[in-house]
Image (cartoon, rainbow, N blue to C red):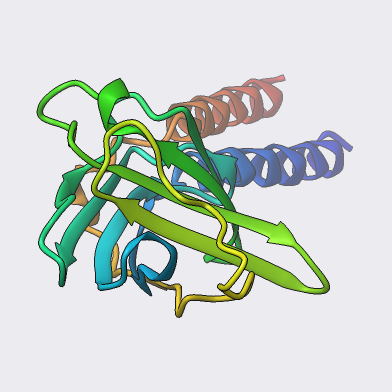
Amino acid sequence: MFFRPLSTGLLSFLAGSLLSVSAALAVPMDYSFTYTNAINGGGVVTGVVRGLQEGTGAATSVEVLSNTLNFGIGEYVGDPLINSWTVAGGVIIAFDFLSLGFENTSPAVTNASLFFVSHEINGVGFRAGLANDPFSISTFSSGASTQDFGLTFEQLPSEDMTAIPLPAGAPLLLTGIAALVVLRRRNRNT
């Protein structure tokens, strides 16, 4: 009689523990990006967005790695005005990021500005730009299309997972199993 409720309780406990363990294992994702800097003077810009997770949140780092016009290279999460990214199924589906150089503090880039924005205009529209100006950046040009600029994001392989701490649910799971063993022994002795 005691065994049936215990096994149902054990299954519920294990299911809850596994959910908390999987939530604790959320690994930050990094994405490379590339685009043509069409509305801020031309050139091709490449870089990386680091530290994104499933859902909506801030990037821990947004860095320009190269620019064919040779300006604005470096990190832009010094003090961004806007830093919001949405990831679903490992794909970046929405983003809004603006970092004006004069707002940043060294070692972040202080002499250039960077932005990314996505919005809905008869489908998905998105823009990105890098300006050689710490105080402003062009986000629209009547001669430029509201779509594309060749902006692409590609998820990078995850870093070494050995640095991930023990999930918060693991000690709870072990404690629950130990309690079940004690209860079962107590039941056998009565």
Measured as percent of width and height from the top left, residue 23 is found at 55, 43
Residue pictured at 47% horizontal, 76% vertical:
149
Q: Nearer the viewer, residue 53 or 137?
A: 137
Q: Nearer the viewer, residue 37 or 74?
A: 37
State whether residue 101 appears in this view: yes
> Is 180 displayed left or right of 75 in the figure?
right
> Vertical placement of 85 versus 170: above or below?
below
Measured as percent of width and height from the top left, residue 46 is found at 25, 68
Picture quadrant where residue 65 is located: bottom left
Q: Nearer the viewer, residue 124 or 44?
A: 44
Where's the N terminus, which quadrant?
top right
Picture quadrant where residue 152 is located: bottom left
Q: Nearer the viewer, residue 60 or 109?
A: 109
> Vertical placement of 72 versus 169: above or below?
below
Residue pictured at 83% horizontal, 73% vertical:
122
Measured as percent of width and height from the top left, residue 96 is found at 55, 45
> Is 80 displayed left or right of 24 in the figure?
left
Measured as percent of width and height from the top left, residue 119 is found at 70, 57
